[in-house]
Image (cartoon, rainbow, N blue to C red):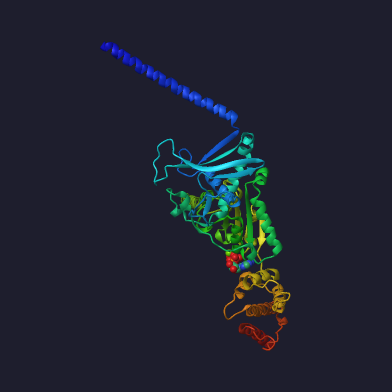
Amino acid sequence: MATNDLWAGIGSALAFLITLTTMAMNQSRIKLLINKISAYLNPYIQITIPEYGAESFKRSDFFVAIEAYLSDLCHQDGRVRKLKAELESDMQKPQVSVDDDQEIVDTFKGATLWWYADTELPKTTVITYRAGDEKRRFYRVAFHKRFHKHIVNDYLPYIIKNGRDVIAKNRQHRLFTNNASSQWSSYDREKSLWSHVEFRHPAKFDMLAMDPAKKEEIKDDLNAFKMGKDYYAKVGKAWKRGYLLFGPPGTGKSMMIAAMANFMNYDIYDMELTVVKNNTELRKLFIETKGKSIIVVEDIDCSVDLTGKRRDKKKAPKKSGDQSDMLQEEDEKMDDEDSKLTLSGVLNFIDGLWSACGEERIIIFTTNYKDKLDQALIRPGRMDMHIEMSYCRYEAFKVLAHNYLNISDIRDSQFFQLFSEIQGLLDQVDMSPADVAEHLIQTEKKDAGACLQALIRDLEILKAKNNSAADCHPQDPTSIVVPDLNPTVMPDLDPTVINIFEVARDSTLES
Ligand SMILES: Nc1ncnc2c1ncn2[C@@H]1O[C@H](COP(=O)(O)OP(=O)(O)OP(=O)(O)O)[C@@H](O)[C@H]1O
Ligand SMILES: [Mg+2]
C-alpha cells in the first residue's frame, strides 16, 4: 500500500511537472504568436535608446544628444507641460528636458515621431552609488513602419548632429593650455595634458575694429567651414581650417581669436610651444584635443625656431680620431633625442595624417612678422586664410567710437568736425586700435569730446614725430625742415617733440 502510495505520489508530481513545462512552452509560443499578430496589425515601430550601454558607466552619447535635441524642441513646442531642469557643471544655463511619461511629437520629412522618456529597472542586479540610481532611463521613439529606413538612415543621424550642436551652444566654453610633460600622468591622461578654465571673453565680431568687408569675408568663411562637413568628405580633406593672423602688436589678433571662438561656439586650445619638448609630445597633445575647437599658437615666430629649413638628415663629415668620433656621435645622439620641435613636426600636426584625427578643428597662428615664417608653414592648405590686422584707419575708428563712446551717426552730431580731423590724421599716422581704444575710455572727468580731442592731440604729436624723423633722414642732412613752434599754432605739442625740433634747428643753424 505504502509502495503504491509512493508511486502514486511520484506519478502525480511528474504529471504536474509535465503540465507546468507544457504550459510554459505554450506560454512562450503564445507570446510569440501574440507578438506576430500585433506586429501584423500594429504598423508602428519603436526604438529604445538607453541612457547607459550594457556594460558602460558612461552615459551614452546618443542618449545625451537626444536629450539635448528634445530639450530644444520643448522650447518650440509649448504642448509639453511637464518638463524638468538640470544644471550640469559645464553648462551656461539649465538644461530643460521632457519629464518621464511625457510625450513629445516631432516631424521629419513627412514622418511623425512620438518620443517619450521613461525609466525601468535593470534586468540584472547593479551596484549603484546613490539611492534611486538603480533605475535606468531611456528614450523611446515610435513611428510608422513605412518610414523605417528613412528614420534610421536620416532622422537619427540628424538628431545626433542637432543635439550635439545644442550641447555645444549651451556649454560653457573652455580655454585650455598645455602642461609641461613633467606634469603628465598616465592615471588621468586627458586632464593632465591640458588644464582648462572657463572661457568668458566678451569679444564679438561687431566689436572688432577692422575693415567691415574683411570682417564679413571672415564670418562667411567660418560659416562655410561649419557647414562644410559633407564638402570636406567629398573632396577627401580633413575637416579643418587654418588661419594666419598677422600684424603689429595691439591690432586685435588675440581679440579676433576670442571673437571667432564665440562666433563658432568652440573651445580654445592655447598651445604653448615653448614647453613642448619634441614632435612626439606635440602629437600627443594634438590627439587629446577635441573637435569643435580652435587650436592657437600665438607668436609662432617667437615660440620655436621654425624659420630654418626642415631638419637636414645628412650628417656633417666626421672629424678624424676615435675620441672625436665618439664625441660627435654623442652630440648627434643628444641632439636627436632632444631634437626639440622641428618645422616638419609642426607641419605634420597641421596637415599630416595625424591632423585628420578628430574633426571640425580650426588652427590659428599669430605673428607680428609674417615675413619671418617659413613659406611651407603658411602655404594655402596649411594656413588657408591670411588675415592682416592693421593699424587703425577711419572705418575701424568708427567701430571703436561706437563701442566706447556710443557715437554711431556723426553726420548731424556735434562731433562731426572732430571725426573729420581724426579721419585725416588716421590716413597719415599709424596708431594701433589698442592705442586708439585706450584714448576712448571715458571717465568722470573726461567726456566723449575730451576723449576725441586727446586722441587728435596725440595723433598730431605722432605725425610731427614721423615728419621730423623723415626730415632728419641721415641720407639727406641738409633737408631738415623745422616746423613753426609757435605755441598758439600747436598748443598741445608734447615737450619731447619740441625738444627734438629744437635740437634739429640748432644743428641746422650750426651747419
Ligand atoms: N581691431 C581691434 N578692434 C577692437 N579692439 C581692439 C582691436 N585691436 C586691439 N583692440 C583692443 O586692444 C586690446 C589688445 O589687443 P590684442 O591683444 O587683441 O592685440 P594683438 O594684436 O593680439 O597684440 P599682440 O601682437 O601684442 O599680441 C584688445 O583687448 C582690445 O581691447
Ligand atoms: Mg595677441
Residue 477 makes an appearance in the image? yes
Residue at 66% x, 69% y is 399
Report the label total: 0
Along the line of sight, which residue is nearer the eye, 390 or 188? 188
- Ligand 2 rendered quadrant: bottom right
State the image coordinates of residue 153 (x, y, percent, origin top left): 62, 38
> What is the quadrant of the N terminus in the image?
top left
Residue at 47% x, 44% y is 58
Left/right placement of residue 162 relative to residue 275 reads right
Residue at 59% x, 32% y is 42
Task: Classify 353 as above or below 208.
Answer: above
Task: Classify 217 as above or below 454.
Answer: above
Along the line of sight, which residue is nearer the eye, 164 or 422? 164
Extreme residue toward the left, this view? 2
Residue 248 makes an appearance in the image? no
State the image coordinates of residue 388 (x, y, percent, origin top left): 66, 62
State the image coordinates of residue 229 (x, y, percent, origin top left): 64, 47
> What is the quadrant of the C terminus in the image?
bottom right
Task: Classify 455 as above or below 90.
Answer: below
State the image coordinates of residue 303 (x, y, percent, origin top left): 55, 60
Left/right placement of residue 394 relative to residue 307 reads right
Along the line of sight, which residue is nearer the eye, 193 or 374? 193
Residue at 40% x, 18% y is 18
Rendering quarter of residue 487: bottom right
